Image (spheres, helix red, strand yellow):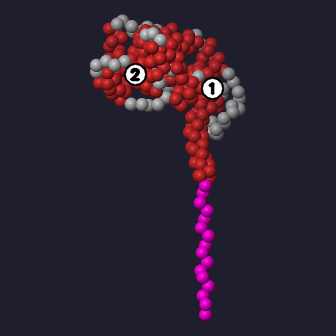
Amino acid sequence: MTTLPALSTPSAPRRSWWQRYRVGAVLQYTLLTLIALLIIIPLLWMLSTSFKPKSEWFLPQIYWIPRTFTTDNYERILNNPSLPIVRWFFNSVFVSSTVTVLTLAVSSTAAYAYARLQFRGKKVIFGMLLVTLFLPGIMFLVPNFLTVSALRLIDTYAGVIIPGLGGVFGVFFMRQFFESLPKELEEAAYIDGATRVQTFWYIALPLSKPALATLGIITFLASWNDFLWPLLILKSRDLVTLPPGLRTLQGAYTSEYGQMMAGAVITAVPVLILYILLQRYIVASVQTTGLKG
């Protein structure tokens, strides 16, 4: 009696690299979509609440679109004499713009020196600066306040602006970008007779526009949203910026949530516009900037 040979079961076909790529891409975009929703949903709820009347603030049901659309919350905060929100808005624009421009100037010049100049103790000094990045910002609150008070800058724009210029992140960020630039461009300029300052101004600085735009947005956003430092320094109502000014809408026993959301929308709009205008520079900076040691 002859036995038939066992039939071998065909093995499952291996996935091609294209199939694996598609699965990875789907998972990646799904994760990014979930993260985007976590960020966008609170903003949409803030916008929706700003157009709701007081009777719809605490309904048991969730209504993304107001059942009774009203602009009363915006009218109250814009027309209230005790809440000069327009003045606070321009105070925030002035302070944040000044801090951003001065920070870009200070950080770019210092970063270029650390990236291109050779001097004794450069690595040690730069390493000490990097250590301060690991320290919480609240540690510098009292020393900065004592310094500003000694300079008699309490309740002035300068008292809010000057301490923000000593950040180390901008120097570190711009140094990494300058390190990624080819030195041959600067060496060619030296051969043509350019000085160090001319090389920085006409070659290195124009090539660093993407990095400057990214640092500018980060600095502007941090200064625009700063609450604690302006609250400590500014005492006059006409000098207050938006974040501490909107604090007055929240009382000890009651809070005007609709007006608070309207104020938050007014606060968020300039930052969104700035980001949309400079988005291409941010993408270019992320693509070209390397964190070289």
Furthest residue in direction top, as rendered: 152
Q: Is residue 11 above or below residue 36?
A: below
The answer to whether any part of residue 182 appears in the image is yes
For mark 1, does the 10 Å Cα neighbourhood hold few (<14), some (14 to 19), or many (20 or more) residues?
many
Residue 171 in the image: x percent, y percent? 41, 21
Of 127 and 202, the residue lying toward us: 202
- Quadrant hosting residue 13: bottom right
Name the residue carrying label 2: 115
Prevailing secondary structure of the magenta residues: loop
Residue 63 in the image: x percent, y percent? 66, 36
Region in magenta: 1-16
Secondary structure beneath label 2: helix
Q: Report the residue at 59% width, 67% height from top.
A: 11
Image quarter where the N terminus lies is bottom right
Left or right, 31 with reference to 142: right
Residue 103 in the image: x percent, y percent? 45, 16
- Residue 191 covered by magenta stretch: no
Q: Report the residue at 62% width, 51% height from top.
A: 18
Q: Is residue 124 above or below residue 144?
A: below
- Residue 50 numbered tag: 1
Furthest residue in direction front, as rendered: 191
Q: CA distance from mark 1 to mark 2?
A: 48 Å
Tell me the amino acid under the disc marked 1. Ser
